[in-house]
Amino acid sequence: HCDPFRQMMVHPRLTPYLEEMLGTGFRLEGLGIITMDEGAEGFWFHEGGEPFDRSRGYLYRNGRMYSGMTNMAVQLTDVGPEDGGFACLPGSHRANFPCPDDIRLYEAAQSRFAQIPAKAGDAILFVECLMHGTLPWRATHQRRSVIMRYNNGVTAEGVMGTWTPPPWLDELTDDQRAVISQPHYRREDKGSDLYKPRD
């Protein structure tokens, strides 16, 4: 329950982007730590816009983006352009056709993938339905990354049964408590100024 991880959950520089993608009242679905040593193999490319997944999908309508699960990968070590690590297929979150297996396995169209260089402390924000995976790690230093998965306030992928607050809930700020809450209706104002109550 280290404080730097708590601060990452609702970092003021990153929260506006999460609100833009997921709306106010977004939730933290989970947090994981990724490490790789030199020579570690990659991980196959997964997701993509097709087949459509309601909890992970992406939609652009009337000048606004809407997304399901959205990830923030915070790099704890530098990632150079030839190091490997996180890579994605740009634009794949908008796909209307399934991706061929040879591309998912990184056996074809390799030049279409983007490996993302980053400095320690940088965050990579991406929608889950963007096809992404991991290239083999070639750097001599260990890859370390924290991945935080967020979703809108009404959707949950991993909640089964009853939600039990953690014993350290009172140690969190109001913003941190809100982001680890159970799924909930956000009660957005959808036009209360359009009507007037009768006298």
Image (spheres, rainbow, N blue to C red):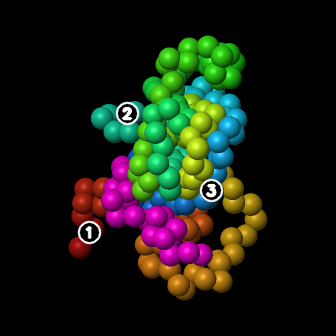
Instruction: Determine which residue is flagged by label 2.
Output: 61
Q: Tell me where the magenta segment starts and ends, as one range.
A: 1-20
Q: Which of 152 and 7 is in front in this view?
A: 7
How crowded is the residue under tag 3: few (<14 C-alpha within 10 Å), some, or many (20+)?
A: few
Drawn side of residue 90 relative to residue 158, left or right: left
**Label 3 vs label 2: CA separation?**
34 Å
Q: In this view, does 12 lie above or below 57?
A: below
Residue 113 visible in the shown view: yes
Q: In this view, does 36 lie to the left or right of 113?
A: right
Q: Where is residue 105 in the image (x, y as percent from the top left)?
A: 68, 23
Dot 1 alpha-carbon crowd within 10 angstroms: few under 14, some 14 to 19, many 20 or more: few
Mark found first going from the N terminus, 1 or 2: 2
Residue behind mark 1: 198
Q: Quadrant of the N terminus?
A: bottom right
Q: Residue farthest to the front?
A: 140
User: Which mark lies nearer to you, 1 or 2?
Assistant: 2
